[in-house]
Image (cartoon, helix red, strand yellow):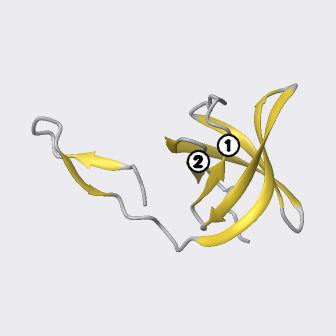
Amino acid sequence: MTDLRKTDGAAGRESAPTPRIGRRRRLIQPGRVVLGPDLSVACEVVDVSTAGARLRVPARIALPETFPLVIAAHDLRTLTVRLRWRRGDFAGVTFEGAGFYVG
């Protein structure tokens, strides 16, 4: 499931969703969305692929276009992510640069 859609330029019609890169793996890991030097918000990483993740973040929390995401797995990882979609308490992100998550 993805909200990333390409338009064909004709009256803004949507074409098929962009396919996900890599297979998602179900995962429940605590995380933190870093919103500033003194502000972070708890989240839950509910699934992950090599290219991105789905997060559970309260809908009342506004997320910027890019932000650091701290994932507490076997070790503590901080990755820069880009927001791709938001639906209620869930958000889809892709990993930026060399920050690919390898579970």
Residue 89 against residue 29 in the figure, above or below: above
Which residue appears at 57% of the width and 43% of the height?
82
* Residue nearer the viewer, 43 or 75: 43
Tell which circle, 1 or 2, labels the residue nearer the N-terminal end: 1
Q: Amino acid at mark 2?
A: Phe
Query: Which structural element holds mark 2?
Result: strand
Front residue of 78/42: it is: 42
Residue 89 lies in what quarter of the image? top right
Q: Position of residue 6 (x, y in %)?
A: 27, 48
In this picture, residue 47 sits left or right of residue 37: left
* Residue 38 horizontal side relative to residue 55, left or right: right
Give the number of the disc on residue 77: none
Residue 90: mark in rendering: 2
Residue 19 coordinates in the image, percent (x, y): 38, 64
> How crowded is the residue under tag 2: few (<14 C-alpha within 10 Å), some, or many (20+)?
some
User: Compared with residue 53, is residue 82 higher up or lower down, i.e. above or below?
Assistant: above
Mark 1 near mark 2, Cβ–Cβ under 8 Å?
yes
- Residue 97 at what x, y percent from top left? 62, 51
> Residue 60's x, y, as percent?
64, 29
The residue labelled by disc 1 is 57
